[in-house]
Amino acid sequence: MQGIDRIIVCPSQSQFPNELSQILHTLTIAKKIHFYKEVGSTQDLAISIVKKKFEDTHGTVIIAERQKNGKGRIDRKWISPKGGVWLSVILKPKIKAAQATLLPIVAALAVCDTINQKTRLNSKIKWPNDIVIEGKKVSGTLVDISIDSKNIDYAVLGIGINANVDVTNIKRYIDTNSRKRALEMTSLKKELSGKKVNIIDLSRILLEKLEYYYLQLEKHYSKRIIQKCRQRSETLNNLVVVEQQNESFECKAIDIDSDGALIVKKSDNNILRIVVGDALVRRK
């Protein structure tokens, strides 16, 4: 995989993308790298690029040193100061539209593997898109998908990792209604007792892991992906609260099915499928 010619777009003239390119072993993902000191949102920028349709954008990566308006699920703001990994990847998946629900799992598994390999910290997936260490959120993923008829036009995978971020400073930017979430935030640096991680190497591992799982999905190895997700899950076999439309109820998370939906059992023994995007799920 060495020697791949990568296109680098870097208005700031930073050495980050060049150093990353030199150590990166991917064939498709990061064939083109955009790097910025600051953007509003890597996700928004990636979507605007792919919508222009004037070039082959499959595998393009947008990386920012910091984001002013980083995005989380359900329009939540993701605080993104310098010291984290903030990136979005444009994909043109050769999979059925019905399999698009597995893309968040692909992203979450890539993050988990990256953290575990780089730091040996035991990270887990909090269904569907959060990565936690000892119950504290260290990373989140976001997937925007455009489906044309029965085909996926494009998918943009957004990933944020609190690597060397000082989470105590982040709390200053969180509004009162979100303060509980801020108290549950952590960073790799905090979990490593103040030791910083190499952001370039962390980004390298992440992109390589992402390509690995993405290719697994394209090769129809979805059963392997789901099984790995079950093994990495922090949600399964625990009591959770599901907030769906105008109702909220307690239940037990018992499985993740073939398309990534969470299977839960209510107190009356009724079994429900919770599809990504249809509800909020939190540990009781």
Image (cartoon, rainbow, N blue to C red):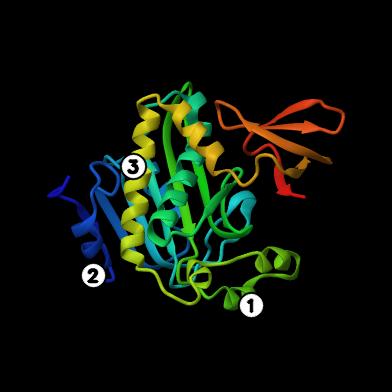
Dot 2 or dot 3: first in sequence order is 2
Query: Residue 46 at x, y = what percent?
Result: 40, 50
> The disc labelled 3 sits on which kind of residue?
Glu
Q: Is 273 left or right of 202, judged from the image as shown?
A: right
Mark toward the viewer: 1 or 3: 3
Query: What number is the disc on residue 15?
Result: 2
Dot 1 or dot 3: first in sequence order is 1
Q: Residue furthest top?
A: 150
Identity of the residue drawn at 43% across and 71% down:
83
Query: Residue 190 at x, y = what percent?
Result: 53, 72
Q: Is 89 left or right of 257, judged from the image as shown?
A: left
* Neighbourhood count class around disc 2 (C-alpha, 10 Å): few under 14, some 14–19, many 20 upward: few
> The disc labelled 1 sits on which kind of residue?
Arg
Query: Residue 72 at x, y = what percent?
Result: 57, 54
Quarter of the figure that contains the N terminus? top left
Query: Residue 58 at x, y = what percent?
Result: 31, 40
Give 51 or 67, whichever is nearer the viewer. Answer: 67
Instruction: Please name the residue that numbered disc 1 is placed on.
Output: 172
> The disc labelled 2 sits on which kind of residue?
Gln
* Label 2 element class: loop
* Label 1 element class: helix
Instruction: Please name the residue that numbered disc 3 is placed on.
Output: 211
Identity of the residue drawn at 35% across and 58% down:
203
Looking at the image, do the residues carrying marks 2 and 3 touch, with CB atoms under 8 Å apart? no
Q: Is residue 173 above or below residue 98?
A: below
Identity of the residue drawn at 26% across and 62% down:
17
Q: CA distance from mark 2 to mark 1?
A: 31 Å
